[in-house]
Image (cartoon, helix red, strand yellow):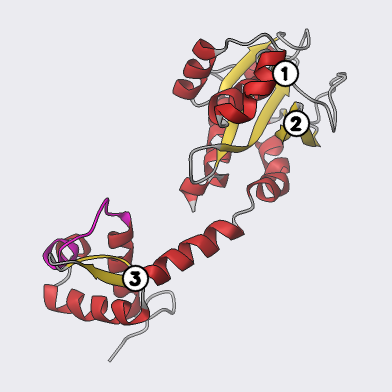
Amino acid sequence: MDEDGAQGGLQSLDAALALLLRLAQAPSAQSLSDLARAAGMPPSKAHRYLASFAHAGLVRQAGRSGKYDLGPAALDLGLAALARLDFVNRAADRLADLVAETGLTALLCVWSENGPVVIRWERSSRHMVTALGLGSTLPLLNSATGRVFLAFAPPALTAGRLAVEGGGGEALRARTRADGYASVTGDLIPGLAAIAAPVLDWQGEAQASVTLIDTDPARAAPESPALAALLRFCKGLGVAAR
């Protein structure tokens, strides 16, 4: 008889779903013994769970090997989950939290035909005078936001804008991808420092960029606490966090 779990769930269902998650995290089809070992349960118990999942289409057995892999219903679930991921709205809803944590002004940008465009502007309590605002378009090479899209957006998407700005950017792209963020100090607007990071989708491509700006370079520097907060924020919004 199933017993209620500590959080009001069913222990047997929790165990079954944990087994399915182990299969989903595996790089390829898995044997019964490997799955049972990974889930910490007897093979006979794992087999009963897998049989139920197979009946529901969540699991299938692959060819002569008899190994288990995800089934068509699992694909349907995955595609439905991906369709519900709304990176931009989630980022916009939480932008004020990032500003409160860092004390810096935050921008949310997406890609447009003319390059990265500011679609959300969340001001901090620190006074700042700048021509940037909603609808501002930023360059690829000279802005932290642009460099994030240069590094993490598909090259075919950014090629046209890059050509307008004179081309190049290979070393900049490689460095930004390696770092996972971009930073500038006065490159675009004298007196402003910026750090930016991508919100990545399931293909590792930037769906949006979140940028922190301030008049004090030390507060928006790579070694600042603000960068760590920014990276946590963007990672929490990306598909890897789901």
Disc 1 element: loop
Residue 140 appears in the figure: no
| Residue at 67% over, 8% down | 166
Q: Say which of marks 2 and 1 sits in front.
A: 2
Q: Say which of marks 3 and 1 sits in front.
A: 1
Three-letter code for the amino acid on which mark 2 is drawn: Glu
Locate residue 59 relative to residue 236 in the image: left or right.
left
Q: Which mark is residue 169?
A: none
Number of residues whose C-alpha sits closer than 10 Å to that of mark 1, classed few (under 14), some (14–19) or many (20 or more): many
Locate residue 206 relative to residue 13 in the image: left or right.
right
Q: Say which of marks 2 and 3 sits in front.
A: 2
Vertical order, 201 against 242 (above or below): above
Disc 3 target residue: 17
Q: Are marks 2 and 1 in contact (CB under 8 Å)?
A: no
- Residue 37 locus on image (x, y percent): 14, 62
Q: Which mark is residue 139?
A: 1
Q: Are marks 2 and 3 in contact (CB under 8 Å)?
A: no
Three-letter code for the amino acid on which mark 3 is drawn: Leu
Number of residues whose C-alpha sits closer than 10 Å to that of mark 2, classed few (under 14), some (14–19) or many (20 or more): few
| Residue at 25% over, 54% down | 28
The residue range painted magenta reads: 25-36
| Residue at 56% over, 31% down | 154
| Residue at 50% over, 26% down | 180
Three-letter code for the amino acid on which mark 1 is drawn: Pro
| 3D distance between C-alphas at marks 2 and 1 | 12 Å
- Residue 139 locus on image (x, y percent): 72, 18
Disc 2 target residue: 113
Disc 2 element: loop
| 3D distance between C-alphas at marks 2 and 3 | 43 Å
